[in-house]
Amino acid sequence: MTESAVHAKGVAFSYGDREALRGIDFEVERGSVHGFLGPNGSGKSTLFKLLATILPLSRGTMKVLGLDLATQAALLREKLGVVFQSPALDKKLSIRRNLVYGGQMFGLGGAALQKRVDEMLEYADLSDRQNDVVSDLSGGLRRRVELAKGMLHEPELLLLDEPSTGLDPGARDDLWTFLRQRENVTVLFTTHLMDEAEHAARLTILHEGAIVGEGTPAELKQSIGGEVLEITAPSPDTLAADLSKAHGVDARVVDKLVRIESSDAHGLVAPLMQSHGDHVDRVTISRPSLADVFLSRTGRRLSEDA
């Protein structure tokens, strides 16, 4: 059985009277890419700060890389690589100088540090840009420098907070291509972006400090049925009630749209239109997405909470 990189039980955290985490349990497999998806206020940033040892663990238990987060945080920091959402580079220095200073902060020095910097420059495909000043770099290149810096000391666990925020789609693809080249590193990331969450081997969905979904992205999408039917109508509440009664479906109103999750939405269209077509303006059918999973588990769209 593979040893867990993170094992959490009953983890809770409050800011005064506001409960940010409500006693959550989760596990992250060693060597995996594990994502935490949720809007602002879901608790994912608080969880990130706990894992990064910025906040103290006061309620619940968490073992990270075999170490007790509450009592062995100092030992754990040596094994962590942390890349925050906000940039942590000196824009007036070159890429290489940023990496050298980053390595020195982790106790590296001399020839060993220079060798490790060379390795990370090559790994991040930055060797030919190493003397460029950071202020001259694109957002995607800066993010790669951040990642290279966070991995200089060969961490066992790499923590990424909203890793591709502010990046264009091409830069996001480059970022994840870079991360997939990792070896012997567990990657744990937080995000509010659905397309980014798809990169996780396993995903935990957070809402208002609680876990509302866990599994692979494919498993989560399959859990709500094969298709999603949405109907635009002048009186959605009345139509939803009528459809539920006439056809035995679970029709509910979300954002003024009548929504039905079904394994055979296509098969429902003809009878629904035959019985209530005069009260329908438009019908759309789609495969479930992670956005649909969040909506199904919380009754809200993730974009609303964000």
Image (spheres, rainbow, N blue to C red):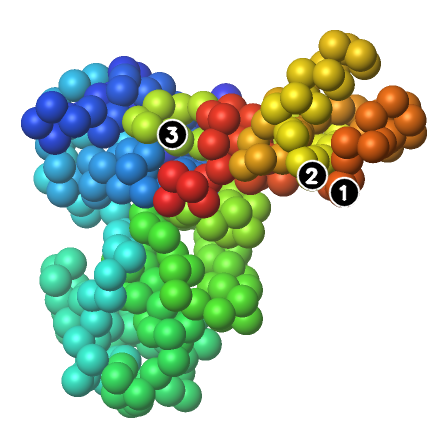
Q: Secondary structure at mark 3?
A: strand
Q: Compared with residue 276, is residue 118 higher up or lower down, i.e. above or below?
A: below
Amino acid type, mark 1: Arg
SS at mark 1 in the image: strand
Density class for disc 1 (Cα within 10 Å; few <14, some 14-19, many ≥20) is: few
Q: Which mark is residue 232?
A: 2
Q: Position of residue 163 (x, y in %)?
A: 38, 56
| Residue closest to the eye, 89 or 295 | 295
Q: Quadrant of residue 39?
A: top left
Residue 187 visible to the viewer:
no
Front tag of 3 and 1: 1
Q: Position of residue 12 (x, y in %)?
A: 22, 22
The reply to whether callout 1 and callout 2 are in contact (CB within 8 Å) is yes
Amino acid carrying label 3: it is His
Q: CA distance from mark 1 to mark 2?
A: 5 Å
Residue highlighted by disc 3: 207
Disc 2, SS: strand
Q: Position of residue 185 (x, y in %)?
A: 41, 47
CA distance separating discs 3 and 1: 31 Å
